[in-house]
């Protein structure tokens, strides 16, 4: 036998021992044949090497439990084991993308209530996503002359929302009501709406709903108040609103009286002020004469009203009166069309708050609760813990509708107000929440009380009723977050698949009422939401 002609020792498939560290690799003998060696010797050496390698492969496959059992469900070698340093998740840094958060909202079960002409059913190839349309909601869902809805409310019978639509050769104002579970809905016609007006403002009053709407008349505009019980509508006395360009109006009921607030210009037309009147809830009669409630030296507009036990909270946007010299210069520039400045004036604006009793009388002096050097563009309010008031507002020194600014919240009590807290947008401070770095687009905040959270007792053992914060934006899905009764974000601010581009307009302790545009129609749907994802 030739010295280099080495035959394999035994069958490798029978000997299932792993190769030892001192064993030379099978390829060590794969050298080219020399002139003294026959050509077959090299061929036989290569064959021996192939047998050894094949035996090792078979040995490894058979020595594992999965291989021995012949299981076809063995884990893929591409999936790293837990703790494997090759696992990207184990070596990813803090900036790695986190997995998507579980949804916090789901459809309540009842089919959406549709106001207007029902849209065509989606094609089979393009199914809707999410309970309320989700990703199917888009800009194409909006159509000219579509149904408009305003802010919603809750009452003993469920939910109510003011709406208007094209019908009867013009625009008709109405109130839509839904049962608490969303299974039953109906429309109650109020009146023809003349002029370019907003949908009626609604407020709960026990088992009834109060609605306030504007109507043009010879002296400017009038405020009409109606009481809706079932399908029966009772109209009350009208209030003169004047010729102010603003359509801001609000109504609320506490006890036996209802309070109506609006803004109107002074007789000299130099500034706007907040006006107030009250009426008997049962008959909408016994109406008091309108009276100003804002400070005489303050230019005030956009009033909002919310009932609390024993009275109300009244809030509005205020700005300082312009100095006489600056006002005169402005009038001179406006008189000359060639030199008049174009664009929107960015003025210092802040929020003022004052408590009222059940009759609408002031129980304190209005006070500023946001910095007077700020630029409040829009705001909303909700009742907080122990009858406190939570205000969410957008502060922005850029023109309306632009991208920028920040959304903050401030907690107001009868004894005073806390410092505003930045919730979203702006320059992120060291102790600011992660949501503070998110973009706002042109969205404005909306507050709806109803979710179980930290504060008063609840069936889940937690205390209080949290407040939902929603930010609707035409360029993307609506963002949703739960606020604690102290005005702090709980569980994060993010879009919800079931919400899509819908806009929450009312909330109860069990559900959110969401409006989804659908062509010329409007879908009203209930979502069951929790501040954090439900456990699985």
Image: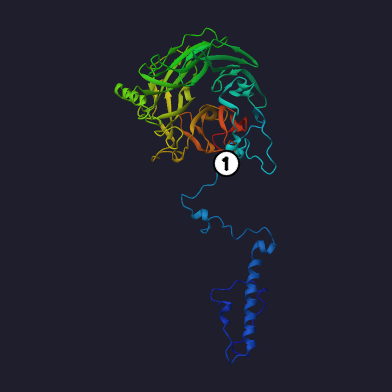
525, 256: nearer the viewer: 525
> Looking at the picture, how far across and down is residue 372, in whole percent?
35, 27
The residue indicated by pointer 1 is: 102
Can residue 78 be seen?
A: yes
Q: Quadrant of residue 367?
A: top left
321, 370: nearer the viewer: 321
Neighbourhood count class around disc 1 (C-alpha, 10 Å): few under 14, some 14–19, many 20 upward: few
Split into 4 quadrants, where in the image is the C terminus?
top right
> Looking at the picture, how far across and down is residue 315, in whole percent?
44, 22
Disc 1 is placed on an element classified as loop
Can residue 358 be seen?
A: no
Q: Is residue 523 above or below residue 254?
A: below
Q: Quadrant of residue 209?
A: top right
For the point 36% across and 24% down, which residue is it? 335
Q: How is the image coloured?
A: rainbow
Work out which residue is located at the far top of the displayed protein and give it. Answer: 286
């Amino acid at each position: 036998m030739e010295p280099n002609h080495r035959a394999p020792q035994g069958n490798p498939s029978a000997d299932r021992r792993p190769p030892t560290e001192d064993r030379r690799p099978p390829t060590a003998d794969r050298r080219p044949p020399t002139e003294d060696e026959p050509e077959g010797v090299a061929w036989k050496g290569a064959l021996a090497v192939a047998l050894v390698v094949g035996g090792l492969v078979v040995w490894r496959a058979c020595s594992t439990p999965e291989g021995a059992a012949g299981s076809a469900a063995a884990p893929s070698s591409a999936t790293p084991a837990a703790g494997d340093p090759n696992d990207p998740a184990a070596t990813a840094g803090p900036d790695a993308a986190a997995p998507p958060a579980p949804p916090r909202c789901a459809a309540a079960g009842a089919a959406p209530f549709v106001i207007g002409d029902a849209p065509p059913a989606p094609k089979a190839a393009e199914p809707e996503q999410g309970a309320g349309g989700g990703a199917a909601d888009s800009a194409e869902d909006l159509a000219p002359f579509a149904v408009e809805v305003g802010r919603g409310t809750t009452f003993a019978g469920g939910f109510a929302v003011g709406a208007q639509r094209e019908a009867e050769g013009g625009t008709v104002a109405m109130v839509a009501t839904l049962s608490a579970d969303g299974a039953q809905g109906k429309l109650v016609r109020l009146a023809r709406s003349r002029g370019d007006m907003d949908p009626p403002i609604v407020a709960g009053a026990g088992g009834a709903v109060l609605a306030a709407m504007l109507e043009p008349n010879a002296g400017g505009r009038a405020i009409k108040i109606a009481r809706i019980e079932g399908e029966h509508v009772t109209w009350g006395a009208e209030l003169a609103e004047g010729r102010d360009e603003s359509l801001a109006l609000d109504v609320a009921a506490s006890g036996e009286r209802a309070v109506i607030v609006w803004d109107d210009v002074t007789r000299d037309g130099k500034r706007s002020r907040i006006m107030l009147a009250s009426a008997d809830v049962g008959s909408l009669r016994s109406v008091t004469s309108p009276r100003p409630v804002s400070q005489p030296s303050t230019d005030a507009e956009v009033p909002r009203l919310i009932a609390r036990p024993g009275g109300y909270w009244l809030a509005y946007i205020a700005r300082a009166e312009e100095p006489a010299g600056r006002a005169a210069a402005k009038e001179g520039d406006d008189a000359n069309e060639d030199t008049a400045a174009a664009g929107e004036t960015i003025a210092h604006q802040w929020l003022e708050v004052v408590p009222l009793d059940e009759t609408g009388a002031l129980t304190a002096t209005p006070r500023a609760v946001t910095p007077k050097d700020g630029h409040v563009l829009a705001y909303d309010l909700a009742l907080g813990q122990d009858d406190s008031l939570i205000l969410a507002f957008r502060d922005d020194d850029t023109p309306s509708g632009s991208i920028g600014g920040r959304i903050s919240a401030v907690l107001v009590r009868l004894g005073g107000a806390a410092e505003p807290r930045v919730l979203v947008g702006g320059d992120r401070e060291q102790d600011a929440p992660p949501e503070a770095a998110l973009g706002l687009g042109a969205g404005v905040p909306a507050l709806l009380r109803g979710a179980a959270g930290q504060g008063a007792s609840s069936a889940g053992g937690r205390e209080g009723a949290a407040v939902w914060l929603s930010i609707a934006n035409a360029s993307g899905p609506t963002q949703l977050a739960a606020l604690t009764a102290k005005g702090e974000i709980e569980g994060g601010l993010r879009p919800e698949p079931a919400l899509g581009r819908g806009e929450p307009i009312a909330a109860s302790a069990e559900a959110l009422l969401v409006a989804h545009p659908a062509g010329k129609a409007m879908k009203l749907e209930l979502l069951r939401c929790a501040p954090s994802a439900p456990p699985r």
